Amino acid sequence: MSYSWKELGLKIPEIMLPKDGTDYEKWSIVACDQYTSDPEYWKKADELVGDAPSTLRLMLPEYYLGKPDEEERIVKIRKAMTDYVDQGILKTLPAGCVVVRRTAEGRSRLGLVISVDLDAFDYNVGATSLIRSTEKTIVERIPPRLRIRRGAPMELPHILILIDDPDRTVIEPLEKAEGTQVVYDTDLMLGGGHITGTFVPEDKMCQALDAMSALFDKAQEHYGQGRAMLMAMGDGNHSLATAKANWEEIKKDLSEEEREDHPARYALCELENVHDEGIVFEPIHRVMFGEEKADGAQILEETVALLKEQNSDAWLADAGTVAGEDQYAIPVIAGGKEQVLVIDHPSSGLEVGALQNALDVLVTEKGYKIDYIHGSDAVRSLAADPGNAGFLLPPMDKFRLFPAVASDGALPRKTFSMGEAVEKRYYIEARSLV
């Protein structure tokens, strides 16, 4: 059966890109939720950009959330957004999408920059929407991000949404379709690899629409009428949840007619195929900071005590210990010393779920700080501090994602990462919200 883009929860956007001659290596900045414990990264990015036009001036790295100058930075972002349009730094393309080929860490993958309908997205537990969250949405994380999006004249996405397309029918044929044009081709700063963007005008998207329609029919057949899951969040869940919250605020004051095509109803994102060989699910590790209330060794002791209460048993073992039957073995580091945390007969079906249950208690009851880290080297570096403890988690099989979310709902938060930090989406495209 053939469906419209709207029926599929999608919309062909009018994308904004920087004018010809812009240095794209300085323009493109990695997702704001990366390097949240690494101020040196953001300092280096700022030095590299200098006075050049850059998305660094259009977004707020989450490292700065809650800092004394947060509001001042947001005001500057609003001004830069307006200035970039008024000064012609940003130009608006005709309606269409951008096919993105990204190469980083020796891997290459394809994506499609398109808009999703926020009325087709529901991050609540038990949702049956076309677009589903793959992790539990922490509503407390939305307000600080909403301060940035609320009233902003444009958006820049780092959101990655997955489709389940084993025959590669939607995105892959578009890269070399007739009538397309390469609009950028650049290296990305600070080890981000290389990226090429190819513009696909709306009238060349017909085959992709037919292919998405076929995926929707398959999803309805597999999951049931009214319960079809066509898209699942890959990255940027809280960013899409923030866009949803912003839209829910705005639409209260709109008529039904105004709601139909209001720009805030949609969010720019990148669709990727979970079957793309270039997509690798990396684990997201945890680092606990004692905040001068405890050292790393004490944090580990308290974690073990909680895990004993929440599971059959738990203990610390020597480095290199492997899991036995019905056990998890999670490498841990405190004060530079590596051990293994063994959880016996765990209550959760994933290592991350069992561990997170204990860490959540330490954050809420003990006041410790937690950060979610991409890359084991970064964990070891942070856990070398005597006041910190690091937990190294295993990767998740990406082909379990759609069945698991459809069956059980959202997974434990920060269960997986689509690649390492340098493989995250870089801000390039923008879209007007006014």
Image (spheres, rainbow, N blue to C red):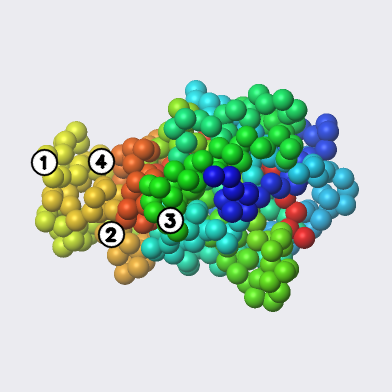
Marks 4 and 3 close (CB-CB < 8 Å): no
Q: Are marks 4 and 2 in contact (CB under 8 Å)?
A: no
- Say whether disc 4 or disc 2 marks the residue closer to the N-terminus: 4
Query: Where is mark 2, residue-wise?
Result: 357
Instruction: Report the residue marked by disc 4.
Output: 331
- The answer to which of 140 and 196 lies nearer the viewer is 196
Which one is in front in this view, the residue at disc 2 or the one at disc 1? 1
Q: Is any part of residue 157 visible from this angle? A: no
Hey, what amino acid is under mark 2? Asn
How far apart in space, not on screen, are marks 3 and 1 (Cα)? 39 Å
Mark 1: few, some, or many residues within 10 Å (few <14, many ≥20)?
few
Which label number is shown at residue 225? 3
Residue hosting label 1: 325
Q: Quadrant of the C terminus?
A: bottom right
Label 2 environment density (alpha carbons within 10 Å; few <14, some 14–19, many ≥20): some
- Mark 3–mark 2 distance (CA, rounded to whole Å): 34 Å
Q: Residue at x 65, y 75 (%)?
A: 252
Residues under labels 4 and 3: Cα distance? 43 Å
Closer to the N terminus: mark 4 or mark 3? 3
User: Which residue lies at the image location 16% right of the left edge and 62% below the top edge?
Assistant: 309
Q: What amino acid type is highlighted by mark number 4? A: Pro
